[in-house]
Image: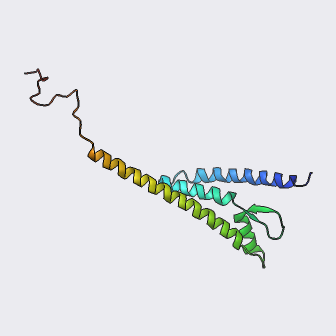
Amino acid sequence: MAPGSEMFVAWIVVGAAGLATLAGVFVLTRFIPLLWLRSLVRCLAAVWLLIPAKIQVVPGYYAPAFIVALFEGMFRREGDPGPAIVALLAGTLVVGALFLGIAAWHWHQSRNEARNAAAAPIDRPVDRPVDGDARDATA
């Protein structure tokens, strides 16, 4: 194999495994009744699966950050899971900020719609005459 092509193949395998895992997350979260919570869990799963981090024992190579944090923190005595955890935390905060921003926008839109609905005049239906109306010829 050409130099670097094994990394390409490895990332294709990681991507395929990540997509399969995301499919599993989508299936497992379909029973969550709150749409925003279900979407949040799905987005966080995607972010956690896709954020890369440097492998400390193999310079120049990357792996998914949650795997690097796990191996550096639990399986290496002198490992430092800090950079991988910081990457995961940053991704989680970005997703959380996006969800809060979208929630604030939806809240603002719903308040404006409620205000506009309260201020709109009530129209009388055309097909139903009002008592005493000249169009009422049943008498």
Relative to 72, is 101 above or below?
above
Drawn side of residue 48 relative to residue 80, left or right:
left
Which percent across, then down, holds residue 107? Answer: 41, 54
Q: Quadrant of residue 120?
A: top left
Relative to 112, is 122 above or below?
above
Give the residue drawn at x 83%, y 70%: 57
Scheme by which the image is coloured: rainbow
Relative to 53, is 33 above or below?
above
Drawn side of residue 50 relative to residue 78, left or right:
left
Q: Nearer the viewer, residue 34 or 98?
A: 98
Q: Nearer the viewer, residue 25 or 122?
A: 122
What residue occupies the far left of the structure in this picture? 139
What residue occupies the far right of the structure in this picture? 1
Drawn side of residue 139 relative to residue 64, left or right:
left
Give the residue drawn at x 53%, y 54%: 38
The quadrant of the picture occupied by the C terminus is top left
Drawn side of residue 3 relative to residue 117, left or right:
right
